[in-house]
Amino acid sequence: MHIWRQSLGFSVSVLTIFGSEAKRWQEALATRKGFTEAIKTEDDKDETILGKLARVTSDPSEVIPEADVVVFVMPAFAHASYLKAIKPHLAQKKTLICGFPGSNGFELEVKFLLGPEISDRITLASAITLPWNCRVETYGVRVKILGTKTDAEVSVAPDEETKRVLSLLQRLVGPQPRLTALNNMLEASLMSINAVWHPPM
């Protein structure tokens, strides 16, 4: 789960609750003063993009209460585990929870697991694809960006938040992919390409 783009004034934190991932990541970052790098190749030329994480943790209480945006970037089978983990720590504010990508029925899973008291006050976004195709080269430190999507469609609930949310997410991902709005969450579920490429079990 990433809250990213610190270079534009966003504080970037990572929450990972699987095994010893957080510890491994922390140890890797300690050798680089907290910096990570992404290698982007265009026209056979490599561009190195540096970033610095505010925190990597396995404890939701350290990052979730202060988060304005919580982005789910893990496989769909892990959504439930993270929703249950962050539920007690969501602040009394209109936090944006975004599946990037979401999954078929992502909004129903969020509402069911967070319950009406929380789900009625959050803003929810679900994208039908990842913004980038990446591969890890060095765990916790270096990734290779193999490709950037040209466009990505996103659904937002409630509807009146669509313009604000798309503007915010566009700042987070950069100029590409170009984010466009879907009509509703049902459209996002029916158009989810993950259901075709990675059939749910």
Image (cartoon, rainbow, N blue to C red):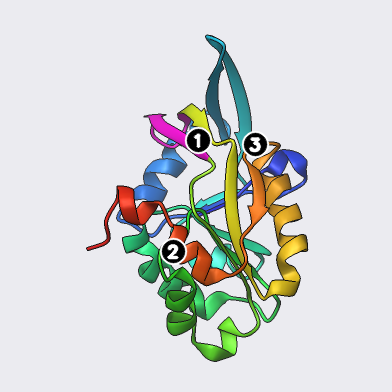
- Residue named by callout 2: 190
Q: Name the residue at 49% across, 73% down.
A: 107
For label 2, the SS is helix
Nearer-the-camera pick, 75 or 179: 179
Question: Of callouts 3 and 1, which one flags the residue occurring earlier in the amino acid sequence?
Answer: 1
- Residue named by callout 3: 176
Work out how far the residue at label 3 is from the one at label 1, CA to CA, in angstroms. 31 Å
> What's under tag 2, amino acid-wise?
Leu
Location of residue 153 with respect to 200 vertically, above or below: above
Work out how far the residue at label 1 is from the one at label 2, CA to CA, in angstroms. 43 Å
Location of residue 128 with respect to 158 vertically, above or below: above
Graded by Cα atoms within 10 Å as few (under 14), some (14 to 19) or many (20 or more), the crowding at tag 1 reads few
Measuring from the top left, give residue 4's x and y in whole percent: 62, 47
Location of residue 2 with respect to 112 vertically, above or below: above
Q: From which residue to which does the magenta span run?
A: 132-143
Question: Of callouts 1 and 2, which one flags the residue occurring earlier in the amino acid sequence?
Answer: 1
> Which residue appears farthest toward the left when viewing the image?
201
